[in-house]
Image (tube, rainbow, N blue to C red):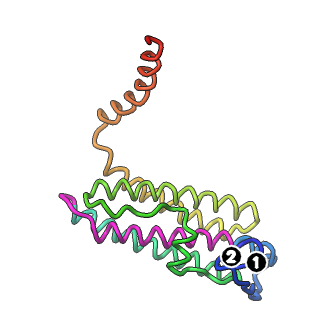
Amino acid sequence: MGSNGRSTNGKSQPLYATRIDLSSELRTKVIAILNHSLASTLDLKTQVKQAHWNVKGLQFYQLHQLFDEMASELEEYVDMVAERVTALGGLAVGTARTAASQSILPEYPFDILDGKDHVIALAERYAAYGKLVRESIDATDDLGDADTADLYTEISRDIDKRLWFLEAHLQTSVEEGVAAAVSEVAEPKAKKTAKRAK
């Protein structure tokens, strides 16, 4: 639902009466934020399931299990966000088509099989989704809806934890991490030196 009181499919939707002591104007704005994040949450869940179904390689079983746990958690967040929309008197807009058209996430790559590639793809999406959730914490808190901000805070903690789990699969050793960081710093300096030498 947009800030103009219209749903994401362009049709007018009612704001149902509730005894919650938040103004209809505030509820309309919060519902728009919730429905926006609902689309991305649904999309992320389906992308995690895509990885769960298609992962291959030496760490197949471990990643297959991990991705299934992550998708189950996301299903809980879908429900929490959608139920908050309806508690505020709104219409939860949570179809697959809406999720696909409203999500902030890029399409999941269909040409990957290896576990590491799936971990990288999901880490990128979890980072983007975590940023959206933190922005939603700030936006709903600024509007004066502490309960919705708290809901997002709960989701944010879990998303950051899962991002850590994903990134831990990509971090091989302290020495390699330090070498990569040094390389990132040294590479631009080497390019500048090469330009000066010409």
Q: Residues within 10 Å of mark 1 (few under 14, many from 20)?
A: some
Measured as percent of width and height from the top left, residue 57 is found at 19, 59
* Residue type highlighted by circle 2: Met
At label 1, the amino acid type is: Gly
Residue 54 horizontal/vertical position (percent): 27, 68
| Mark sitting on residue 86 | none
Q: Which residue lies under the disc numbered 1?
A: 5
| Residue in the picture at 48% in, 60% down | 106
Whether pointer 1 and pointer 2 mark residues with C-beta atoms closer than 8 Å, the reply is yes
Magenta highlight: main SS: helix
Q: Is residue 32 magenta?
A: yes
Provide residue 144's location: percent of width, then percent of height: 76, 66
> Residue at (44%, 57%) from the top-left corner?
161
Report how many numbered discs are placed on residues in the image: 2
Question: Circle 2 sits on which residue?
Answer: 1
Describe the element under mark 1 as helix, strand or loop.
Answer: loop
Q: CA distance from mark 1 to mark 2?
A: 6 Å
Can you give x and y, in whole percent of width and height, for residue 139 in the image?
A: 70, 61
Is residue 196 or residue 98 the one in the foreground?
Answer: 196
Residue 111 is left or right of residue 44, and the answer is left
- SS at mark 2 in the image: loop
Which quadrant: the N terminus? bottom right
Q: Residue furthest front?
A: 198
- x 36%, y 71%: residue: 49
Q: Judge from the rendering whether residue 124 lies leftward or rightward of residue 57; answer left or right.
A: right
The residue lying at 51 percent from left, 70 percent from top is 41
Q: Nearer the viewer, residue 158 or 183?
A: 183
Relative to 188, is 54 above or below? below
Task: Verify whether residue 166 appears in magenta.
Answer: no
Residues shaded magenta: 31-59
Q: Residue furthest top?
A: 197
